[in-house]
Amino acid sequence: MQLNRGTISLLIISLVVVIAVGLFQQPLLSVLTPPTPTIEVKQILPFRIAQEAIKLTISRDSNFTTLERPDDVWQVTDATNLDDARITNDEMVDGILQLMAELEYMRKFESDDLAQFGLADSVTSIEIVTPEQQLRLTLGGTNPDRNNLYISVNDDNTVYLVPAVFEFSNIMRLATTPPYRDIVEADDNLPDNLLFPDVFGYQIMEFRIRDMRDGSVVIYQQGEQGTWILDGTVVNTEIEIDHVQAAVNVSQFLFLEIEPLESSVRESLTNLAILTLSMTTDDGRAYTMAVHAVDDRGYAGILDDGTTQKAYALPIGTVNSFFDMIIQPPYLTS
């Protein structure tokens, strides 16, 4: 069969069209297909700040604590309450920096009026120095609901709204109480500062409260991105919980106010506890505190970390709130 000139021309044109479509198909698809939206990174500080920091200063009012690590080990080098004889709690400082590296903001604002955020005259700050830069976080006031905190970096006009994570209260206490490692002798010289000097909220995997009088219990388990999951005797899993309040509830054990228990009171305690508080961390540490009633003198707690036991006098109001947590889980009210 012979092809006339018109047929040959038509075949050539068709072939050119096929080649052109093949060559330009991908660019055309990229134009017609909308791009995948980029997820906004809400971290405030460089992610590697925990590994790169060489100096850390925590200031509050006229008090401060400065730490440096010239040889990969953190040391208190200057402070309002400096004690050269005390060994620095190196793991605690690493935990603070890791918390700062993972800190994310919920909202951010551009404002020339820092006073409305409590930042204009703030005397509370965390300063982190690396070989390349110096970063100063200024802590301001809280929002009207008091569950979020305003901060700025290097006194910039950008204001970040961050969850008022309960670790901040522990960090700022270090301005007056440097993070020394507790040295407990085998007698009644028990530490009277922090109950858990090297445990941070983000490390808690489970916190459990049990009323030993009737066996009722509530269990807090940490979920993703600072959320908490509830379980227990009177928990309604169909109702959304208030994660901020859940974090506050857990923190009451982490930052429990304590005093050394008099040896005479400890000797009078029976083996029957009325409440137990237990906590496990992401690195496998487990703590249990048995709470005993001490007549009209309040409560006593025996803390067991699997190796040693320590006895403390506990505040009446806080212990009573643990009982309330079992029957009144932190559900959202709106």
Image (tube, grey):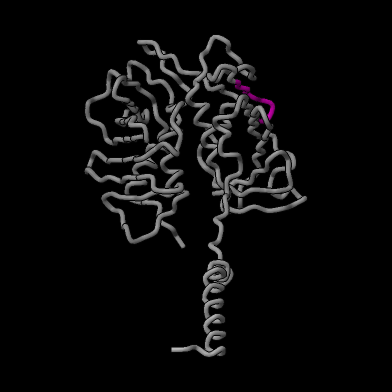
> Could you tell me what secondary structure mostly forms the magenta stretch?
strand
Residue 86: % across, % down: 52, 12
Q: Quadrant of the N terminus?
A: bottom left
In the image, residue 65 lies in the stretch drawn in magenta = yes
88 or 270: nearer the eye? Answer: 88
In the image, residue 48 lies in the stretch drawn in magenta = no
Q: Is residue 252 left or right of residue 108?
A: left
Residue 255: % across, % down: 46, 33
Q: Residue at x 32, y 40 (%)?
A: 208
Q: Is residue 83 left or right of residue 138?
A: left
Report the label total: 0
State which region is magenta: 60-68
Most distant residue in the front direction: 2
Residue 198, by quadrant, is top left
Q: Is residue 64 left or right of residue 264?
A: right
Q: Residue at x 62, y 28 (%)?
A: 58
Q: Is residue 116 left or right of residue 25?
A: right
Residue 171: % across, % down: 55, 32
